[in-house]
Amino acid sequence: MMMKMRLLTLYFSLICSTTVFAQLSPPGMGETKTAFWSAAGVKQELDNINTSMTYVGFGRISGSNEADPLDMPSIFVLNQEFYHKFSPDWKYSFALSYRRQHEYDESFEENKQDAINQEFRFYIRLQYTADLGTVRWTTTLRQEARKFYTDDFAEVPDGLQFRTRLKTQLVVPLDNAGVNSVAGSAEALFAIAKDNSEGWGNFEYKESRFCLYYSLSLKDIPVTFDIGYMNDLIGYASDTYDANYIAMDIIVKDPF
């Protein structure tokens, strides 16, 4: 019942469609019950229509200790993205990302032969934003190309993947000054992968992510603090499991 409610919520969000809210959302960290994500970024306005976002992030998972989201190391992320606003309501962006993730077996013991999975990612996004009074509603279409390697850059099964992401998000201010705000979002992910021996698979639904964030944007110093929660619902039908993430980030605005 809970899974059906989540999927109905996601479907409604995508049909109604809305990332203008600046939080650095956590990446997926695989089969874990709980996880923790922290990130620090620099957002630099290059001119009136172009913006740069650079961030570094770290993730940890609970592993076999399901109550402790800090128990085991999971992922390191380095990301660079450029935004271009080509109309009052529309913008596009492109990005390069490097990710280094620990791989564990079913008992959360690290595989000695293939303990690290490296990922190089390129993605583009198209965003449309509508202001509904003081509420901001944003719809995002994101297309990714991902290439995976082992720690010594050897090929891995399903090493090339293309992924499509659809996201809708509402940002609600909590005061007139815009210091405090909350954001809720729903995102669906679809992917197709190429196996080294069997070729391309099918384009399939993979997972959904539901986020709720609180943001504090200070007026005296150009810094935004975000704290949030993400539920990552992976799979569908009877083959479904989910993970609960706690996330925190800090973004420095226009330091240069």
Image: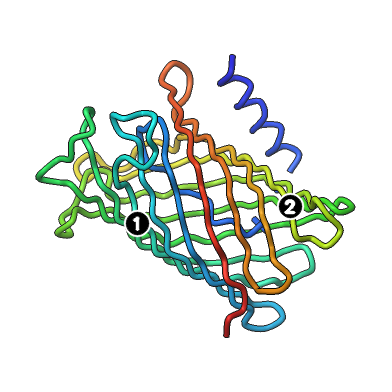
| Left or right: 206, with 87 as reference point | left
Q: Give SS at disc 1.
A: strand
Q: Is residue 172 above or below residue 85?
A: above
Residue displayed at 74% across by 50% down: 171
> Tag 1: residue type?
Phe
Q: Which residue is mark 1?
A: 76
Instruction: Give me the residue at 60% from left, 27% from top.
Output: 7
- Which sits in the foreground, 38 or 186? 38
Q: Is residue 93 visible?
A: yes
x%, y% of residue 195?
A: 26, 43
x, y percent for residue 92: 62, 65
Tell me what residue is drawn at x 82 percent, y 51 percent. 135
Picture coordinates of residue 60, whole percent (x, y): 36, 45
> Looking at the image, is mark 2 or mark 1 earlier in the sequence?
1
**For the residues marked 2 and 1, what is the alpha-carbon distance in whole angstroms?**
28 Å
Q: Residue at x 10, y 43 (%)?
A: 112
Structure colour scheme? rainbow
Residue hosting label 2: 181
